């Protein structure tokens, strides 16, 4: 497949603890093209660890292991730490959940965006400033000049997350990993931020990995969905076909959601089965 | 009458009609924070009325004042004016023990609302001791059973419980004094959907068994549609609309804000949000 951007084969993430090794991710394989792929799961399913391990950001004592993580034909596992730094933020960017914790509180927003650009491309200060202002405008910030000068604490959650997206997209990456990018935001703000992200990703022909716990949101936003449970992929499908999902876990999640359109007297509680943990992971490579 | 006007009128006319059998009634509630030039009005002239045995939802985004209304009712905010009536009798700024017997609150974050160094047993028996109840042993066991935990959990510490189990303990604590009204402040928003379903089912069962009246605050319209019969929408400290759950299901809210909120909770729609 020529348009595959990223292909991950047999990824494991392990954490040694006093009581033995915990496998956070257990041998999953998936691929991402120039499309929107959603990774959904409950807390502890390994979805965030999957996102981080693509950029090799698992900190010790955590260990990651994979047969291959191929990005544009190169195996990222063979890269040195130095080479990885050129990938991170340049070709693959990551947006985290809470802008409060991902922006540096003592630098102005503009300085941080310029830094991201100047680190990866040879541009003058003036050009960087110009680029940052344009990018702030692209994420629909009404007064880019003012926001450029402001500090993270002066921004609302929605603004902060737009700044994060601006910072991550200014280097023109090919793949964006968004880890619960809108979970800390109000629903209406959330939709606006998603619309901005959606537009930019489509215009630039990027790939997007969208990590979320919200099945409803992911199915309406993404092209393809990967559903994780206990470190494995239990099911994968096109977002439009989620209602046809067959795995009892996916069905259970769908049934557990209260819905505005169809009232139910009682919600179906998810009956977890141990067998789900033993099942082999589904290969989500296209 | 133009649409927006009637929407603004609705809360008042509603409360006037139902004043007779209202269990909890809030009239022209204002809440302020800060002093002098820093003074900020978080809740503006809010009037709602909750029926005996009813389940009333308040939705809104962060900063809309929805939690502050609950906190004012519960007595956790001091600088309020207006009137809060319970069973027709106004409550004063200082609350007494009898008030605690009548109203209890469940908070949002089960990770923050339980004392990390107190066992479940201590958490549950403390209110009983303060109020001089007898038969504490049996009551604690019954409460654990009520919330589906069982006696095994009695001597555990919060860190030995999952998020859902903690929230069950918090619910049990609120039920210890056999209150008639439960104030629920985003009780499931910190939980996974499968756990949320369990807790919402638990609320439904307890309401039936104990004949409780609920006031629930949440940002999740689907949760409120599932739980509540009547819903108030708040924005910038004001109630912009009060509707019953059917009006919400049929997507016939009157104000543009409620419609946007409703649309947003249905999932991402590129056409609706893309050009804003």
Image: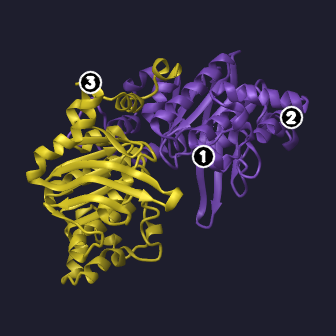
Mark in front: 3 vs 1: 3
Chain B appears in which tint? yellow
Residue matched to label 3 = B2
- x, y percentage for residue A154? 64, 47
Q: CA distance from mark 3 to mark 1?
A: 41 Å
Residue at far left of view? B20
Residue matched to label 1 = A98
Q: Residues within 10 Å of mark 1 (few under 14, many from 20)?
A: many
Q: Quadrant of residue A265?
A: top left
Q: Quadrant of residue A69?
A: top right
Q: CA distance from mark 3 to mark 2?
A: 55 Å
Chain represented in purple: A
Judge whether residue B186 can be spotted in this image: no
Residue matched to label 2 = A118
Residue at far front of view? B36
Indicate the secondary structure of the residue bearing disc 1: loop
Relative to A140, A150 lies left or right: right
Between B50 and B187, the one nearer to me in the picture: B50
Q: Quadrant of the C terminus of chain A?
A: top right
- x, y percentage for residue B199? 31, 52
Judge whether residue B253 can be spotted in this image: yes
Q: Quadrant of the N terminus of chain A?
A: top right
Chain name for mark 2: A
Indicate the secondary structure of the residue bearing disc 2: helix
Chain name for mark 3: B
């Amino acid at each position: 497949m020529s348009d595959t951007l990223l292909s991950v084969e047999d990824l494991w993430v392990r954490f040694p603890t006093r009581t033995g090794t915990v496998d956070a991710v257990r041998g999953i394989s998936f691929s991402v093209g120039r499309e929107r792929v959603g990774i959904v799961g409950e807390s502890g399913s390994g979805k965030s660890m999957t996102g981080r391990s693509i950029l090799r950001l698992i900190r010790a004592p955590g260990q990651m292991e994979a047969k291959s993580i191929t990005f544009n034909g190169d195996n990222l596992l063979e890269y040195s730490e130095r080479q990885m730094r050129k990938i991170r933020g340049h070709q693959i960017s990551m947006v985290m959940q809470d802008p409060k914790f991902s922006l540096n509180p003592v630098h102005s927003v503009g300085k941080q965006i310029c830094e991201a650009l100047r680190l990866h491309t040879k541009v003058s200060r003036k050009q960087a400033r110009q680029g940052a202002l344009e990018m702030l405008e692209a994420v629909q910030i009404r007064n880019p000049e003012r926001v450029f000068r402001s500090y993270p604490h002066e921004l609302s959650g929605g603004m902060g997350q737009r700044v994060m997206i601006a910072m991550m997209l200014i280097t023109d990456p090919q793949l964006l990993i968004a880890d619960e990018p809108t979970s800390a935001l109000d629903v209406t703000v959330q939709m606006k931020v998603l619309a901005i992200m959606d537009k930019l990703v489509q215009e630039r022909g990027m790939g997007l990995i969208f990590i979320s716990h919200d099945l409803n949101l992911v199915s309406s936003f993404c092209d393809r969905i990967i559903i994780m449970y206990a470190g494995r992929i239990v099911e994968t499908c096109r977002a439009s076909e989620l209602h046809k999902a067959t795995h009892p876990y996916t069905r259970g999640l769908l049934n557990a959601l209260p819905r505005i359109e169809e009232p139910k007297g009682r919600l179906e509680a998810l009956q977890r089965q141990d067998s789900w943990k033993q099942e082999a992971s589904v290969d989500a490579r296209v | 009458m133009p649409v927006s006007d009637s929407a603004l009128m609705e809360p008042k006319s509603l409360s006037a009609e139902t004043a007779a059998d209202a269990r909890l009634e809030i009239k022209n509630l204002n809440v302020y924070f800060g002093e002098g030039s820093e003074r900020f009005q978080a809740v503006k002239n809010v009037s709602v009325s909750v029926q005996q045995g009813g389940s009333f939802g308040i939705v809104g985004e962060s900063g809309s004042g929805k939690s502050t209304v609950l906190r004012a009712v519960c007595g956790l905010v001091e600088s309020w004016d207006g009137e809060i009536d319970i069973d027709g009798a106004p409550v004063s700024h200082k609350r007494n023990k009898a008030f605690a017997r009548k109203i209890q609150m469940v908070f949002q974050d089960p990770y923050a609302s339980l004392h990390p160094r107190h066992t479940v047993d201590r958490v549950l028996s403390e209110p009983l001791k303060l109020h001089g109840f007898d038969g504490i042993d049996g009551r604690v066991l019954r409460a654990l059973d009520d919330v589906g935990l069982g006696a095994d959990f009695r001597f555990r510490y919060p860190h030995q419980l999952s998020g859902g189990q903690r929230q069950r303990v918090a619910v049990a604590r609120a039920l210890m004094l056999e209150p008639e009204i439960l104030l629920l402040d985003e009780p499931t928003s910190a939980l996974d959907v499968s756990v949320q379903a369990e807790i919402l089912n638990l609320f439904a069962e307890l309401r039936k068994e104990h004949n409780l009246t609920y006031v629930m605050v949440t940002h999740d319209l689907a949760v409120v549609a599932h739980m509540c019969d009547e819903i108030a929408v708040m924005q910038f400290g004001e109630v912009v609309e009060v509707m019953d759950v059917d009006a919400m299901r049929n997507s016939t809210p009157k104000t543009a804000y409620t419609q946007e909120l409703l649309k947003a909770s249905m999932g991402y729609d590129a056409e609706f949000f893309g050009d804003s």
